[in-house]
Image (spheres, rainbow, N blue to C red):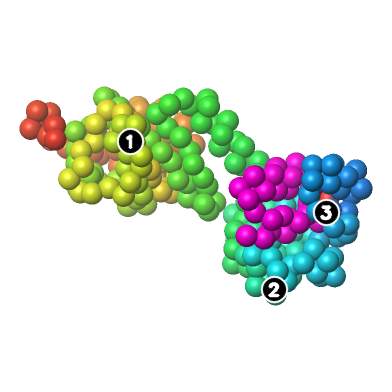
């Protein structure tokens, strides 16, 4: 595939390297001379200019591109570049660096194909390292939605349940299941949940605390703190109302940078 990357700074250059390593063709657009020179020294074709100008993008051969990544630190440049990309029927990805407020996201989300917030992605990686092995955030796909991978523990209330018996909060959905160290797959209803199994779940931030309590067995206070919420109603209700289960009978997730 062919990509045009606007901005050869930290985010743009790293993205370009990954794409090139996977065999794709990349042209970069950058108006800062030292930054442009650094990208060229790494073997990239770089167009000199402002990525928010159509003539510059045409010089970068936007007409032949499959996708445009507007990855500068300037939101106006990024948005304008994406609008030009839309005109040329490219897939458009726009970086935002301002405070991750829902208003900013909603303002642009309907007009580009994808919005990324690198600082948030970096924070997810740091959070995963700090939390350890039972919970791993994968991505924020909207201001209020996150995809997480959780590992079932002995302390989890649902340990021993089958997928069909698993009842998550209304704003959470199981996307994939992995038995122990096996690859993730689409779950079937008769799969059992046991210590070490992994579930990938899409959840609203408001119910992450509940999900963590059910699948990992965190206490209500710890789950709420780790999820950044104060709610734990669904998990508490399950713990208080669910009958005890017989474990033996149920032994069978281009601009400024």
Asked whether, in this view, residue 69 is left or right of residue 132, the answer is right
Q: Is residue 212 magenta?
A: no
Please name the residue that numbered disc 3 is placed on.
46
Report x, y in % for residue 60: 80, 63
Secondary structure, mark 2, is loop
Q: Earlier in the sequence, mark 2 or mark 3?
A: 3
Quadrant position of residue 184 = top left
Distance (Cα) linking label 2 and label 3: 20 Å
Q: Is residue 61 visible?
A: yes
Q: Nearer the viewer, mark 2 or mark 3?
A: 3
Distance (Cα) linking label 2 and label 1: 42 Å
Q: Earlier in the sequence, mark 3 or mark 1?
A: 3
Please name the residue that numbered disc 2 is placed on.
88
User: Which residues, given as a range, are shown in magenta?
Assistant: 1-29
In this picture, is 30 found above or below 108? above
Please name the residue that numbered disc 1 is placed on.
182
Q: Earlier in the sequence, mark 2 or mark 1?
A: 2
Quadrant position of residue 63 = bottom right
């Amino acid at each position: 595939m062919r990509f045009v990357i606007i901005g050869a700074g930290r985010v743009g250059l790293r993205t370009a390297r990954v794409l090139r390593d996977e065999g794709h063709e990349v042209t970069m657009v950058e108006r800062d001379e030292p930054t442009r020179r650094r990208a060229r020294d790494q073997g990239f074709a770089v167009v000199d200019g402002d990525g928010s100008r159509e003539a510059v993008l045409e010089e970068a051969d936007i007409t032949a591109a499959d996708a445009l990544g507007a990855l500068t630190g300037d939101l106006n440049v990024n948005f304008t570049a994406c609008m030009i990309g839309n005109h040329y029927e490219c897939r458009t990805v726009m970086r935002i660096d301002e405070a991750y407020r829902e208003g900013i996201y909603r303002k642009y989300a309907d007009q580009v194909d994808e919005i990324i917030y690198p600082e948030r992605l970096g924070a997810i990686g740091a959070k995963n390292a700090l939390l350890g092995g039972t919970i791993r955030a994968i991505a924020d796909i909207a201001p209020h939605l996150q995809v997480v991978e959780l590992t079932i523990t002995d302390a989890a209330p649902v340990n021993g349940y089958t997928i069909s018996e698993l009842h998550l909060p209304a704003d959470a959905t199981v996307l994939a299941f992995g038995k122990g160290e096996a690859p993730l797959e689409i779950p079937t209803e008769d799969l059992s949940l046991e210590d070490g199994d992994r579930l990938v779940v899409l959840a609203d931030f408001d119910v992450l605390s509940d999900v963590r309590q059910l699948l990992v067995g965190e206490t209500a206070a710890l789950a709420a703190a780790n999820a950044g919420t104060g709610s734990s109603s669904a998990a508490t209700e399950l713990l208080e109302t669910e009958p005890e289960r017989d474990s033996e009978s149920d032994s069978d997730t281009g601009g400024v940078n």
